[in-house]
Image (cartoon, rainbow, N blue to C red):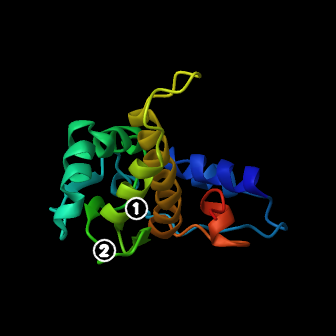
Amino acid sequence: MVKIIATCVVALFLGSATALFAAPNDTPTLEAEVPADAAALMPNRVDLQYLPPKSSAHDSVYKLVQEERLLETIRDLLAPFRLPQQLLLETTGCDGEVNARYDDGVITVCYELLDWFWQSAPQETTPAGIAPIDALAGSVYQIIIHEAGHAVFDLLKIPIFGNEEDDAGVRHG
């Protein structure tokens, strides 16, 4: 099931949804709501916003994610995705909530979650060669790509055939 959905997502990004869903006249088809005008699906539609933290306790992680350009890396990774509108990727304070979420064209990553990732990272480079910043970056990339999965389903109107959390990525917890 996941392989079929992944194939559909890739085809939609490449603008070939018609070919993917084409079938003989007597066979039912799965119709995706794709804009008729292919120009409406454009790459490079991810904007970034590092909002200042609400708590001074998050000032260091706020500066760290900017210096390491973590959001810029994700933006560049998502740049080829052909989306019908802008997608905003933002960091912000969430009043104590350790979370990341997607809602209505915005992926929000809470400084509380970033701080938790940073506090959970090894203090020194591990024997396997994983530096503390690499542990932070890996966690941040994984959670944002998961939320981007929700965004893609929403923005491209891809039907969900099971549990949305499973379809968007891996279940966390």
In terms of secondary structure, where does tag 1 sit? helix
Q: Position of residue 18 (x, y in %)?
A: 60, 55
Residue 13 location (% of width, % of height):
50, 48
Task: Name the residue carrying label 2.
Answer: 94
What amino acid does circle 1 point to?
Leu
Is residue 109 visible in the rendered image? The answer is no
SS of the residue at dot 2? loop
Q: Residue visible at 43% across and 68% down?
A: 99
Category of crowding for the residue at label 2, using alpha-carbon neighbours closer than 10 angstroms: few (below 14), some (14–19), many (at least 20):
some
Q: Report the front residue among 158 and 34.
A: 158
Q: CA distance from mark 1 to mark 2?
A: 9 Å
Q: Residue furthest front?
A: 123
Q: Residue at x 22, y 52 (%)?
A: 62
Say whether marks 1 and 2 touch (CB < 8 Å): yes
* Residue corresponding to mark 1: 113
Q: For residue 141, which quarter of the picture?
A: top left
Look at label 2 and name its amino acid. Answer: Cys
**9 on left or right of 41:** right
